[in-house]
Amino acid sequence: MLFLPVSDAQEPQEGSSQSVQLSTIRLWEHRMHRWMEAYRTGLSTKDAQFQVKQFSSTKYKSHRRIPETLAHIF
């Protein structure tokens, strides 16, 4: 594993901030926090993957509605 000094890691690289949207960076940051938390609690790789997928699911786009296909079942 390659570790950068903290001073190098905190300095933005030229052009990198313009090539990726801030919302994308935040999504990946949240996902990585989920992975770290899963491993921190002692889960195995498969269990951690299941837990991260469970919270990273894009099944529903909003907490106030469900997809039409699922609504027809009810």
Image (spheres, grey):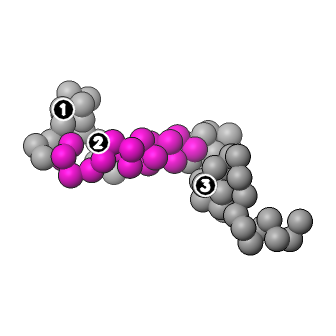
At horizontal 66% and vertical 57% (from top left) the residue drawn is 60
Report the side of 68 relative to 28 (left or right): right
Q: Earlier in the sequence, mark 3 or mark 1?
A: 1
Instruction: Tally the marks.
Output: 3
Give the residue at mark 1.
11
Task: Give the Cα separation between the discs numbered 2 and 3.
Answer: 36 Å
Q: Residues within 10 Å of mark 3 (few under 14, many from 20)?
A: few
- Residue 72: x and y, percent? 82, 71
Q: Which SS does the magenta portion mostly show? A: helix
Q: Nearer the viewer, mark 1 or mark 2?
A: 1
| Observer able to see residue 50 | no
Above or below, comparing residue 8 to residue 63 in the picture: above
| Magenta span | 16-34
Q: Nearer the viewer, mark 3 or mark 1?
A: 3
Looking at the picture, which amino acid does disc 3 mark? Lys
Give the residue at mark 2.
3
Give the residue at mark 3.
61
Between 69 and 19, the residue placed more toward the observer is: 69
Between 46 and 73, the residue placed more toward the observer is: 73
At horizontal 18% and vertical 32% (from top left) the residue drawn is 11
